[in-house]
Image: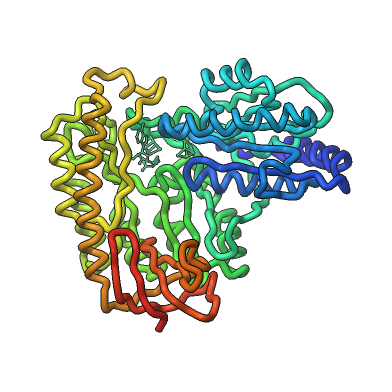
Amino acid sequence: MGFVDFSEINKQNEYLSKARAILEGKGKKAFVMTLGCQQNEADSEKISALLQKMGYTLTSKEEEADILIVNTCAIREHAEKRALSIVGRFKHYKSANPDIIIGVCGCMTAQEHRREHFKRSYHYVNFTFGTGAIHRLPEFVYNALNGGKRYFDIDPETPKIAEGLDSVRESTYRAWVSIMYGCNNFCTYCIVPYVRGRERSRKKEDILLEIKDLVKKGYKEITLLGQNVNSYGKDLENRTSISELLDDISKIEGDFWLHLMTSHPKDASDEMIEAIKASPRTSGHFHLPLQSGSDDILKRMNRHYNLEKYLGIIEKLRAENENITLTTDIIVGFPGESEDDFERTLEVIERVKYDSVFSFIYSPRKGTPAASMENQIPEEIKHERYQRFCDKQNDISKEINDSFVGKSVRVLVDGKSKSNEKMYTSRTQGNKIVHFECDKDYTGSFINVKITRADTFNLFGEII
Ligand code: SAH
Ligand code: SF4
Ligand code: F3S
């Protein structure tokens, strides 16, 4: 598999120096807006680092920025609409100051019809680029600074991996580490394989170095990112696997939690499950997307597992470890979903009792097989089912949260609560939100909290 070679890296370093020569000492500011999933967040942290190296100061105020970058998501229509409205809003900055640079990147711009739309209808956008071209940002910015032509980059089907890019991380204690990019699975509803290209893994040594560095810096939670981390390493020249990677990570000393985001049930091997269970860093939480409880729908989603296989994995995860926090993703209203199919999904969530579920109303994505399937479900039925689904899951979440009252949990503190000055907010290993009162600021540290009260989405407690 390909990695970006030295000559390309050197070329980008030259652009970076040339951009810095223009920008340095001018007090120019950069604003990066991120939509979408953790992979986009990780990408934006690299974009921010490149902008900083070019001589920009990062700002969280869009109105004072000299360059604005919108990192877009294409997973559902709503995400694309949001991106269009944000880019639309940026027009008046450019009207007020034509020197302002506006770039749009991420999954949405990898689609030809969207790229064309930005080109034709958003004349003030200087450039767009896909997720495989982040390392080329210095070139795009330098070109724009020099008054070059508007530019709309197209990613190859399998972009090369650019190692060695720094990140300006949002948090000093929670970090994303991409272990692979792209996706080969082509679930029939999903746009990701079309916009992020084929699967490619980073080398194990590079990942381990990054994790060691994060642990040394005091990071307490590390999330390994990939669309299907269970197939990590299969494409590498030195073939390896997620369980080998987890074994190697387990040898790194330090007190931190480790998450996998996301596992695909079709590739969840026994070795991987054992590796997850073997370490206290990973054994507290597992996210395993189900998508639907109906075998017929799973088949038409091209998921390559059935309910029996899925439930078998859950059983193995829970064996000797009943308290593991389990979370999942569900799509409601996939084309052809009958009332009976939908009820299968309700039965599974009743049976598994997930701590929480990320549930989505099916959104047709242009160019995916499901978008042209017959029997698209009418909006009102999708919404009605979604509501029934949420009501049921909320009851389950509340029931599980209630069972925490009286127990002690270990949490990682996130800082002062937004709604209550006196309270701090934190999260458990399984991502449960825990609020507690405290005089001392433990942000970024682990502490133990005794739970005294619960509602559907929150736990409340006292520091021990
Ligand atoms: N690679 C991950 C998923 C990434 S997308 C995996 O396979 O689990 C995150 C979630 O978005 C998916 O799990 C799915 O539940 C949801 N999703 C993807 N495409 C969708 C669509 N077209 N409409 C609604 N939800 C969708
Ligand atoms: Fe999309 Fe399926 Fe790939 Fe996940 S595994 S990113 S849902 S195609
Ligand atoms: Fe969205 Fe791209 Fe992530 S489509 S969900 S930002 S992989």
Residue 413 image offset from top left, x and y in percent: 48, 70
Measured as percent of width and height from the top left, residue 178 is found at: 52, 49
Q: Residue at x 27, y 27 (%)?
A: 379
| Image quarter where ligand 1 lies | top left
- The residue that appears at 19% across and 30% down in the rendered structure is 337
- What residue is drawn where x is 37% and y is 23%? 368
* Position of residue 355 in the picture relative to residue 412 (left or right): left
Q: Quadrant of residue 460?
A: bottom left
Here the colouring is rainbow
Most extreme residue toward the bottom is: 464
Q: Is residue 271 above or below residue 82?
A: below
The residue shown at (73%, 31%) is 140
**In this view, which residue lies farthest toward the top?**
120
Residue 251 can be seen, yes or no: no
User: Residue pushed farthest left?
Assistant: 340
Foreground residue, 364 or 288? 364
